[in-house]
Structure formats: structure tokens, C-alpha cells
Image (spheres, helix red, strand yellow):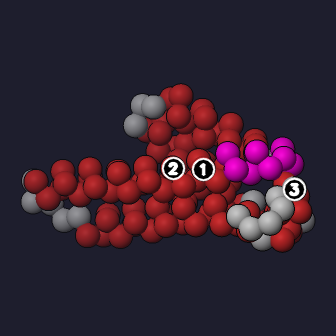
Amino acid sequence: MKAALLSLAPTLSLLLLAAHFYRAGWLPLAVLSVLLVGLLLVPRPWAARAVQVALLAGGVEWLRTLAALAAERMAVGQPYLRMALILLSVAAVTGLSALVFRSHALRARFGLGGSI
């Protein structure tokens, strides 16, 4: 039960990434993001590591998107601060979702020994 609750943050982060990729027209990355949610059901260390790497890469993608959109908005004189704060928050939550695998419940579920 506790492992399922802890898996909620990575699940939501990956689904939000899938929506982002789908909207951008990057269907293969959208499908990959959804498939990575399925890895949360595979109790193996490699599955946890794959999800962690994807979440960290997702955080970087949100930062890349933030930079691109902010530059576009600045170039045409539109406000960008609120958008920047929202995307920065999304990037932080996505990246930090990788840390749930440090919890005792998920380390036990995925067979992760030692520190992460």
C-alpha cells in the first residue's frame, strides 16, 4: 500500500510528460513515457533505475521547454514570469519524483540495496 502511494508522484510526472510530448507531436516519446509507468509494476532494480533516469531527463526537458517558451515570449514582448514559475515547478516535481525510490518501501519493493 505504501509503495503504491509513493509511486503516485512518478506516475503523475510520467503521464504529464506523455501529454507534453503528445502535444508537441513527439508520439514515440509520449508512448515511451506511458510505457515507463508500466515499469513501476516490475519489481526489479533495473526498472526503478530506468524510471529514475526518465524522470531526471523529463525534468531537463521541462527546463528546455521553459527556456524556449520564455525566449519566444520575451522576443515578442509578452509576459513570461508566471509561465516560467509554473514550468520551473513542474521541472522540480518531475526531477524530485526520482527521489521516492530512496524510501524504504520502494527500495524493498524493487530490491534496491545500499544508497541510491
Query: Which residues lie in the magenta part?
Result: 42-50
Secondary structure that dominates the magenta span: helix
- At x 38% / y 57%, what residue is drawn? 63
**Residue for point 26% across, 70% down:** 81
User: Is there CB contact under 8 Å for labels 1 and 2?
Assistant: yes
Label 3, on which residue?
Answer: 111
Counting from the top left corner in percent of width and height, residue 27 is at 51, 29
**Label 3 or label 2, whichever comes before in sequence order:** 2
Q: Tell me which amino acid carries mark 1.
A: Val
Q: CA distance from mark 1 to mark 3?
A: 17 Å
Which tag is nearer the camera, tag 3 or tag 2? 3
Q: Position of residue 41 (x, y in %)?
A: 83, 46
Q: Is residue 64 above or below residue 80?
A: above
What element does badge 1 sit on?
A: helix
Q: CA distance from mark 1 to mark 2?
A: 6 Å
Residue 60 against residue 89 in the figure, above or below: above
- Residue 101 in sight here: yes
Query: Does residue 4 show up?
Result: no
Circle 2: residue type = Ala
Res. 57 mark: 2
Type of amino acid at the residue the image marks with label 3: Gly
Determine the residue positioned at 45% across, 68% down: 89
